[in-house]
Amino acid sequence: MPLSELQAFLQRPPCHGRPHPTSLLGFYAKQIAAHNALKKAMLHTPHLIDYVAVADATICPGHNHIRRLGIGDHKRLERLHQEYHQSIAAMGERSISSPNNGDWSDVDSAENAFEQAIIGAYWYKKMEDGNPACEAEKPT
């Protein structure tokens, strides 16, 4: 986030009356936090999680955030979100049947693809909105 945007953001009072997250960066942060919490739960008590429900991304709050935030290429994000959920569910099932299986590479790959797509959507939206600073800041 450019410094000027951060300063403007920090000067606004907090808004508690609307759904969160309110931006793609907020959604990105929420995704990271949710993933970390879910992974910790899976590592410590994999048998307490309903992996059939986890496999369905449409019941995840993230699905609604993707639609609500008005992301142009929401179909791609929805697909990557679904793939992420399916990889988490598959890992959970493997954790129950084979507790010593610590290979999270499929989950890590799906998580990375989904999160990079969120960041890509953020940069696309910035360019679409005509932010002149975004070209210099966009990671390569």
Image: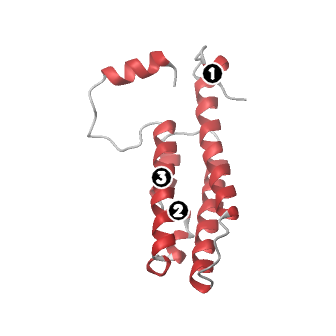
Instruction: Tell me which amino acid carries mark 3.
Output: Asn
Q: Which residue is mark 2?
A: 58
Q: Is residue 26 left or right of residue 124?
A: left
**Residue 103 x/y as whole percent:** 67, 69
Quarter-wise, where is residue 72 in the image?
top right
Q: Between label 1 and label 2, give the one nearer the viewer.
A: 1
Q: Earlier in the sequence, mark 1 or mark 2?
A: 2
Q: Is residue 12 visible?
A: yes
Seen from the viewer's position, the closer of residues 101 and 133 is 101
Q: Is residue 64 above or below residue 29?
A: below
Q: Are marks 2 and 3 in contact (CB under 8 Å)?
A: no
Q: Which mark is residue 137?
A: 1
Q: Is residue 18 above or below residue 124?
A: below
Q: Residues within 10 Å of mark 2 (few under 14, many from 20)?
A: some
Q: Which residue is mark 3?
A: 64
**Residue at image location 26% in from the left, 40% down from the top:** 17
| Outermost front residue | 100
**Residue at image location 53% in from the left, 39% down from the top:** 70
Cα separation, mark 1 vs mark 3, equals: 29 Å
